[in-house]
């Protein structure tokens, strides 16, 4: 099998700001795995919060280059098991795992959702994210992209005023992501007011380590709470049960589609809602997420929509959120450059 690593600097359409960071570009690694005339693509973006860079991922992958080149077949679960055994970071594993799945599906001539026994007849629509900015600028960003569902990043001194201002201009559903920025008291104070403003749920309002805080919110917060930073790997799903109403799975954090499929099954067995989110990936990563949508309650896969220029084709997110799935197998990805 052939291996190629490509580094991209993805330029964002707007400065993207959350409670702990701000950026105008996103570094991204794309892994290309080729076998028998087909190429599979996988992606993982850098992340300072988890101390991951494109260079660190490339170094990890190049250490096992000889193993990859010696492969004559591809079976994603077995490949993932090997990568885990070699103790690569979850981000590097994700890029490789997504590429392996895309390649496997292309060789089988079937999309992944079909290989997993699902259909694309029903799926949740993605939200569109509005990053933290001045209130006027956040309103401007929202009006620039009319959409039925928005995720609003909060964690400012004027959070309620932001939602009140946005609500004046749209009847769309709002989701709130505070990225660990609130206290228990803030959450309990804001939740009823946000619910009245048609907010659907809160994502990770408290710090991930604040277990006692989440216990204090249980049964008192009037809005559902979804775990993000509190649910990184498979073992975290059970830990979130009883504290959260649902989980947000990030492929880069958990290590790709292989563990994500298990996390979905586990969460459903615990009667928890399941969401999959993105990390500002291009259509390489987003197209992999799209294959999971028939199994999800919610999805946040607007990463490619936030870019000035995409680097690939794959899933097409049309106006209103309807998906046009690729006609080729796997995740249906083709690189543009």
Image: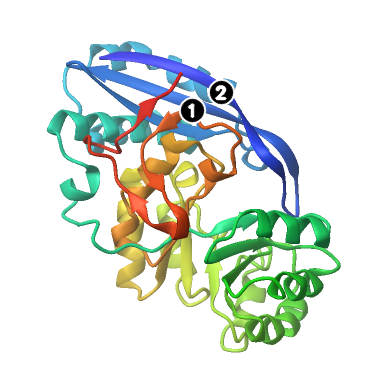
Q: Which residue is mark 1?
A: 311
Q: Secondary structure at mark 1?
A: loop
Query: Going by the image, does 2 lie left or right of 309?
Result: left
Residue 174, given in percent of the width and then of the height, sits at 60, 70
Can you tell which mark lies on residue 8?
Answer: 2
Can you tell which mark lies on residue 65?
Answer: none
Residue 18, given in percent of the width and then of the height, sits at 72, 52
CB under 8 Å between discs 2 and 1: yes
Q: Bin the neighbour count of mark 2 within 10 Å (Cα to Cα): few under 14, some 14-19, many 20 and up.
A: some
Against 326, residue 160 (above or below) is below
The residue sitting at the right extreme is 157
Residue at left offset 60%, top offset 62%: 151
Query: Going by the image, does 10 lie left or right of 3?
Result: right
Against 103, residue 2 (above or below) is above
Res 3 seen here: yes
Residue at left offset 52%, top offset 39%: 281
Residue at left offset 58%, top offset 81%: 223
Quadrant holding the N terminus: top left
The image quarter containing residue 274 is bottom left
Of circles 2 and 1, which is in front?
1
Q: Secondary structure at mark 2?
A: strand
Residue at left offset 35%, top offset 76%: 271
Residue placed most toward the observer, 295 or 86: 295
Residue placed most toward the observer, 83 or 46: 46
Residue 56, given in percent of the width and then of the height, sits at 57, 23
Residue 127, given in percent of the width and then of the height, sits at 52, 60
């Amino acid at each position: 099998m052939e291996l190629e690593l490509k580094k991209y600097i993805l330029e964002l359409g707007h400065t993207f700001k959350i409670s702990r960071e701000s950026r105008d570009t996103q570094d991204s690694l794309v892994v290309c795995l080729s076998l028998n005339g087909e190429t599979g693509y996988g992606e993982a973006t850098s992340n300072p919060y988890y101390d991951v860079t494109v260079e660190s991922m490339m170094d990890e992958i190049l250490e096992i280059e000889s193993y990859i080149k010696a492969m004559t077949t591809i079976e994603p679960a077995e490949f993932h098991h090997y990568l885990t055994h070699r103790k690569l970071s979850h981000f590097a594993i994700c890029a490789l795992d997504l590429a392996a799945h895309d390649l496997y599906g292309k060789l089988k001539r079937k999309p992944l959702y079909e290989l997993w026994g699902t259909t694309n007849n029903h799926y949740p629509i993605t939200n569109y994210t509005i990053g933290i900015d001045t209130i006027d600028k956040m309103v401007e960003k929202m009006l620039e992209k009319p959409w039925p569902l928005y995720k609003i990043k909060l964690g400012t001194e004027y959070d309620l005023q932001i939602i009140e201002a946005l609500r004046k201009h749209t009847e769309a559903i709002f989701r709130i992501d505070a990225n660990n920025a609130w206290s228990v008291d803030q959450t309990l104070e804001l939740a009823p007011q946000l619910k009245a403003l048609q907010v659907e749920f809160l994502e990770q309002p408290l710090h991930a380590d604040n277990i006692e805080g989440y216990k204090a919110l249980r049964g008192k917060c009037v809005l559902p709470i979804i775990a993000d930073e509190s649910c990184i790997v498979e073992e975290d799903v059970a830990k979130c049960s009883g504290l959260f109403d649902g989980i947000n799975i990030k492929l880069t954090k958990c290590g790709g589609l292989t563990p994500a499929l298990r996390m979905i099954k586990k969460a459903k067995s615990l009667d928890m809602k399941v969401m999959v989110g993105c990390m500002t990936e291009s259509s390489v990563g987003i197209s992999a997420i799209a294959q999971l949508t028939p199994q999800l309650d919610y999805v946040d896969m607007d990463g490619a929509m936030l870019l000035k220029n995409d680097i690939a084709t794959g899933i097409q997110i049309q106006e209103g959120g309807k998906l046009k799935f690729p006609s080729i197998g796997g995740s249906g990805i083709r690189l543009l450059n």
